């Protein structure tokens, strides 16, 4: 075994003493310096957290669309041209789409909204009237391709397409994308023990539905095959 020479031992001691001099001495607990250190550490943590939240928000924007700070405004989703179904006609423009999504939101509050293929088909077969909205970027489109024909055969039902299934889902009060909704003009029967919509909610639903149905009638409703 090699023995440590006095010269090497002396160098090691010198290095330890130099490191001890360079090491910061923590301030005494309870002093102003100690509080300043704690505040600085907390500030660094808060800054890192804010930076991370900002990155996450930007990531969500790039994936899902543009986020709006105002809760009343809907998130806008970019839909590529090749994602729009060839049978999506008539297709609502941006101005009409905003009215439609606003009416969908009001109808949801008034309990006058049917979501998804099963609920919509069931309501149409029962004879419900109203406005049918279909998402143009649903794949495969076969899951909803029969609904326009059902709407044309039904009495008192108008229909049109909107660009985004994500926006349609958000407007109808769900986090998931929605392929179709029916804004029913037929007053729903509700049990007495269930929450009832207010008179204002019913009025807003009725006015919005009448306006949207009038504009939907002006669109070209020919079905493409």
Image: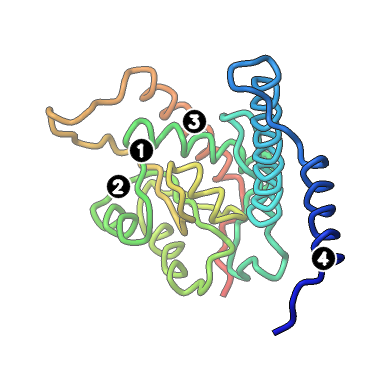
**Mark closer to the chain start, 3 or 4:** 4
Q: Quadrant of residue 42?
A: top right
**Mark closer to the chain start, 4 or 2:** 4
* Residue at image location 67% in from the left, 45% down from the top: 52
**Seen in the image, is 15 located left or right of residue 159?**
right
Q: x%, y% of residue 74?
A: 60, 38
Q: Secondary structure at mark 3?
A: helix
Question: Which one is nearer the viewer's eye here, 13 or 22?
Answer: 13
* Residue at image location 43% in from the left, 71% down from the top: 143
**How has the structure been colored for display?**
rainbow
Q: How many marks?
A: 4
Q: Residues within 10 Å of mark 3 (few under 14, many from 20)?
A: some
Answer whether labels 3 and 2 touch (C-beta < 8 Å): no
What residue does disc 4 label?
6
What residue does disc 3 label?
208
Q: x%, y% of residue 28?
A: 63, 22
Question: Which one is nearer the viewer's eye here, 27 or 123?
Answer: 27
Q: Residues within 10 Å of mark 4 (few under 14, many from 20)?
A: few
Question: Which one is nearer the viewer's eye here, 107 or 223?
Answer: 107
What residue does disc 2 label?
128
Give the label, 4 or 1, closer to the camera: 4
| Furthest residue toward left | 192
Give the label, 3 or 4, closer to the camera: 4
Determine the CA span between mark 4 and mark 1: 98 Å
């Amino acid at each position: 075994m090699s023995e440590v020479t006095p010269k090497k031992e002396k160098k090691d001691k010198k290095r330890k003493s130099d490191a001890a001099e360079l090491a910061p001495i923590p301030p005494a607990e309870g002093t102003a310096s100690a509080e300043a250190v704690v505040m600085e550490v907390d500030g660094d943590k808060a800054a890192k957290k804010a930076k991370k939240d900002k990155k996450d928000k930007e990531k969500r924007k790039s994936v899902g669309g543009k986020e709006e700070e105002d809760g009343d405004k809907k998130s806008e989703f970019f839909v590529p041209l090749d994602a729009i179904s060839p049978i999506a006609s008539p297709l609502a423009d941006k101005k009409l789409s905003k009215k439609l999504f606003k009416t969908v939101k009001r109808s949801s509050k008034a309990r006058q909204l049917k979501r998804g293929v099963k609920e919509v088909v069931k309501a149409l077969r029962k004879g419900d009237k109203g406005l049918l909205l279909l998402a143009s970027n649903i794949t495969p489109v076969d899951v909803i391709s029969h609904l326009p024909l059902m709407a044309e055969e039904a009495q008192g039902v108008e229909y049109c397409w909107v660009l985004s299934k994500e926006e349609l889902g958000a407007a109808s009060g769900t986090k998931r994308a929605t392929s179709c909704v029916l804004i029913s003009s037929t007053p729903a029967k509700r049990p007495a023990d269930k929450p009832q919509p207010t008179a204002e909610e019913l009025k807003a639903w009725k006015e919005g539905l009448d306006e949207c149905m009038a504009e939907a009638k002006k669109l070209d409703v020919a079905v493409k095959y």
